[in-house]
Amino acid sequence: GQQVMQIPQYQHVQEGEDFTTYCNSSTTLSNIQWYKQRPGGHPVFLIQLVKSGEVKKQKRLTFQFGEAKKNSSLHITATQTTDVGTYFCAADQTGANNLFFGTGTRLTVIP
Amino acid sequence: EAGVAQSPRYKIIEKRQSVAFWCNPISGHATLYWYQQILGQGPKLLIQFQNNGVVDDSQLPKDRFSAERLKGVDSTLKIQPAKLEDSAVYLCASSPRGWLAGSGELFFGEGSRLTVL
């Protein structure tokens, strides 16, 4: 199946620091989605990116889709303890909502 | 609006036994997914249904796993016989989008946690 790698695997930050996770696909994607999973919870949809070079913002979160549509990033400005969780990208190669999840980045925020 | 319902939430079995998980998607959602999430890993797609037809089951270990979605609504995932490495959370998700309608948000259930001893 689809290979989707995320880095870093883990990230510990002090509250108020910024955080970035990167997602890389071995193939060109139709679109990419981002999900957040709280400890003990299930993945919850954050956003979908479709266009090459697209940038979307949700309050302190900024999402970017690479020009070649093979990579994406999620940046959180001034982290809060509520940002704790694992962030997954989910790659759709065919555009048929056939989603392959990345390895995830687990974020810990130290108060 | 009711979310994706899954049962049971927890199941403990011994290896070589069988187990079944049930999922009821959000009403009207055409696409249903089963994912396997091993502790510390990302969800791995097992099977994707569009209505009652299979879109993708390329990663389903068909010698022991089976899934069906009769009548295009709820779905059952079965493991027979279970192995130790099947210990994981089995997540069901649904989407109003799918094969012909393009991509969109997946709505996940709470998951069924399986422990194989």
Image: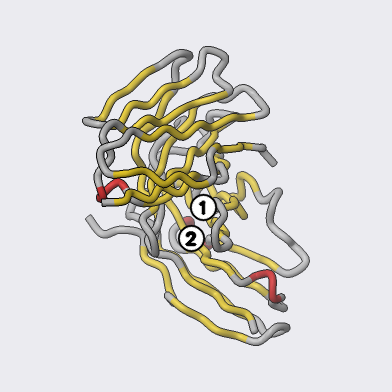
Q: Position of residue B67 (x, y in %)?
A: 61, 63
Q: Residue B17 carries which label?
A: none
**Mark 1 belongs to chain:** B
A104 on left or right of B79? left
Where residue B79 sits, quadrant-wise, is: bottom right
What's the residue at 69%, 70% (across, down)? Answer: B85
Q: What residue type is labelled 1?
A: Tyr
Residue A71 placement (x, y as % from top left):
54, 24
Mark 1 vs 2, N-terminal side? 1
State the SS at label 2.
Answer: strand
Quadrant placement of the N terminus of chain A: top right
User: Tag 1's secondary structure?
Assistant: strand
Task: Give above or below for B99 relative to A31.
Answer: below
The disc label shown at residue B33, or none: 1
Q: Which of the two residues, A20 or A23, is positioned nearer the viewer here?
A: A20
- CB under 8 Å between discs 1 and 2: yes
Residue at horizontal 24%, vertical 44%? A80
**Residues flagged by tags 1 and 2 on a common chain:** yes
Which residue is drawn at the image coordinates 57% and 59% (left, top)? Answer: B36
- Circle 2 is placed at which residue position? B91
Q: Can you give x and y, in whole percent of width and height, for residue A72 in the image?
A: 49, 26
Chain under label 2? Answer: B
Which residue is more in the foreground, B5 or B68?
B5
